[in-house]
Amino acid sequence: MGHNDSSYANAPLEYQSETGRLNILGFWIFLGAEIVLFSTLFATYFVLHGRTAGGVLPAELFDMKLVLIMTFLLLVSSFTCGIAVHEMRRGSTKGVVIWTILTLLLGAGFVGFELFEFFHYVHEGASIHTSAYWSAFFVLLGTHGLHVSIGIFWITGILFQIKKRGLTPQTAAKIFISSLYWHFLDVVWIFIFTAVYLIGLGGLL
């Protein structure tokens, strides 16, 4: 299963092994399940939108400057992730490592700002127990933030494999799969930015 297929010799590195091709296909199926998960969370959020039980309103707490910083970090990390894949296809192990580390640092910055945001909201009286709306908010954003955190640890592990084994069809497939995951989380965040923050601020932006 892990042998190289001569008919794929001219394909991108991540597609040159049968194992890599099957893993990539399997990950696309996994992303389908992730789409269902986040679609359910978004649907729940919209159903519960406005049900703040007379408590603090999102427009009173949302800090658009902070949200824009988080958005910038994640968008740039998606760009650096793309460059890492480009470097992989050029056969540059050093380029992959450098751009992937930058991606992880930007992702860590995003998670740090999100945790700061959560703690601030809780301090101001908005927690997962405050109302139906805030429960939906924290579950949706918390699930996304957890996925980003998992991605950071997962991709860090892939970096160690690259340092040990170099760029092979197998490690290249892992890089490519992790990039799909990272770009997916970036797309989810764009939906969160629009549906949660812009609408939460009353559509003023």
Image (cartoon, rainbow, N blue to C red):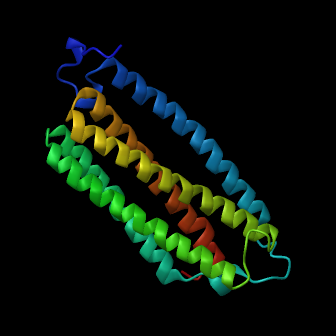
Q: Which residue is painted at 27% across and 34% down in the image?
A: 172
Decide which of 28, 104 is in the foreground and name it.
104
Answer with left or right where residue 190 lies relative to residue 125: left
- Picture coordinates of residue 105, whole percent (x, y): 34, 63
Answer with left or right where residue 201 lies relative to residue 94: right
Q: Which quadrant holds the N terminus?
A: top left
**Where 173 sits versus 57, above or below?**
above
Decide which of 34, 99 is in the foreground and name it.
99
Quadrant of res 12: top left
- Picture coordinates of residue 85, whole percent (x, y): 26, 44
Quadrant of res 137: bottom right
**Where 117 sits versus 108, above or below?**
below
Q: Which residue is painted at 65% across and 76% down in the image?
A: 200
Count of numbered marks:
0
Q: Which residue is painted at 25% across and 27% down in the image?
A: 169
- Picture coordinates of residue 65, whole percent (x, y): 47, 83
Quadrant of res 173: top left
Q: Which residue is painted at 37% across and 47% down in the image?
A: 155
Residue 202 appears in view: no
**Where 133 sits versus 122, above or below?**
above
Residue 82 appears in view: yes
Answer with left or right where residue 152 lies relative to residue 54: left
- Picture coordinates of residue 191, whole percent (x, y): 55, 60
Answer with left or right where residue 145 lies relative to residue 163: right
